[in-house]
Amino acid sequence: MAKLRTAYFCQNCGAQYSQWMGQCKNCGQWNTLVEEIVEKTSSHKTPPFSKSKQHVINIIEVETSEEPRIKTPSEELNRVLGGGIVLGSVTLIGGEPGIGKSTLLLQLALKMKKKIFYVSGEESASQIKMRADRLTDIQNPNCFLFTETNLEKILQEAKKLEPDFVIIDSIQTLQSQLIESSPGTVSQIRECSNEIIKYAKENNIPVFLVGHITKDGQIAGPKVLEHMVDVVLNFDGDRNHLFRLLRANKNRFGSTSEIGIYEMISQGLKEIKNPSEILITKKFEELSGNSIAVTLEGNRPMLLEIQALVSTAVYGTPQRSSTGFDAKRLNMLLAVLEKRAGFQLGAKDVFLNITGGIKTDDPALDLAVVASILSSNEDIAISEHYCFAGEIGLSGEIRPIAQAEQRITEAEKLGYEKIFISNLNKLPKKKFGIKIEEVSKIEDFHERLF
């Protein structure tokens, strides 16, 4: 019988210790060490990824070729992945419970004209079939379900089936017989992900893994899991709103600056081709406190509606509240308005909201936020044909922004007549049908706007 020993693993970072201690020395977290039984046996040796003998080669002699990609039926997913799924890649997708991770992958499995091996450790086959019937009328005869948590059985069935694509929901439910610990522990996740990655690389089959997240928003398990996989996707959004954003936190085969936008409906997730038209409310009358910001999510320009409400503080301490926008940045902008432009906002409540449940940290939103606050403070409506893009510095200057031409083009496409923007370093070569109003200081901006 193999000799058993216990070790202590940090549930936050995966560091291993021989004895228990209150604080993890690696990540500094308290009370995260958990005792696990580790089996050491000399009979189990992990074979290398490649069966061929490797040798040293000069980098100049290495031949490169374009990685073949599988196009998915979802254009938004293709955009985020960099053009499609690379053969042999392992993609980890994480997000809040109920946000739509399993729905996204099940829709993918039903619509792809490939042999799909769908492994679920959380739902029964009948539950998956009920959800599949609700999502789409398309039936994929090459989609095979397997409800199992034993890793060895899953890999054995995968080798028999020889699928084109594997989906595992979720990595935290899997358990290997080689590790004497519960599913979801650091050692189990590390061992299971190792074997799955080895299977994907050896057989050149793309694998999608669903990952649970912690209360801090990080993917549960060791941080090394995110280093091992090729792509890490984050599926987020407000459950009280319909929109979901798919972002790439890591992508070995493409850019991490692209995002995909979906809308949650009763039939599942629907792709949003032009988010600007949906995120902006069609108003019948002009109201104060509303402005349109031209933001950039990755390389994708979007127009968002910013709402602000400025009112006299009822209680002694004025309130500062923001939804979808950084509260500390809001306080900074209010301080700049008071110090540099002379607006008395220190004794007033300020509430800020980005409509549609969208969260963004683009600094070019500053100008639209200030416009909304000034509009609400003076109770003067901003024309619905105006939009804004500019970053505001601490001295009250309006700083240049990235990819200004792309933002101007998007505003023009949606029919806006004037865009307030920071001073451009050089005038665009292209002639635009929208009037470009360049502003350099907060004081100038206020005079030109009202």
Image (tube, grey):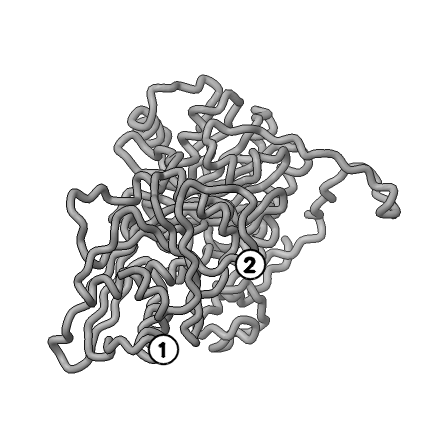
Q: Position of residue 124 (x, y in %)?
A: 36, 33
Distance, label 2 to label 1, CA atoms, is 24 Å
Few, some or many residues within 10 Å of mark 1 (<14, 14–19, 20+): some
Report if residue 155 is visible in the image: yes
Residue receiving disc 2? 425
Task: Using the image, determine if residue 334 lies above or below residue 322.
Answer: below
Few, some or many residues within 10 Å of mark 2 (<14, 14–19, 20+): few
For image coordinates 49% across by 45% down, the residue present is 406
- Mark found first going from the N terminus, 2 or 1: 1
Q: Position of residue 386 (x, y in %)?
A: 31, 50
In terms of secondary structure, where does tag 2 sit? loop
Residue 340's disc number: 1
Of 440 and 263, nearer the camera is: 440
For image coordinates 58% across by 57% down, the residue present is 224
The disc labelled 1 sits on which kind of residue?
Answer: Arg
Task: Using the image, determine if residue 4 lies above or below residue 430.
Answer: below
The disc labelled 2 sits on which kind of residue?
Answer: Asn
Q: Answer yes or no: do the residues labelled 2 and 1 have beta carbons within 8 Å?
A: no
For image coordinates 35% across by 35% down, the residue present is 269
Of 64 and 447, nearer the camera is: 447
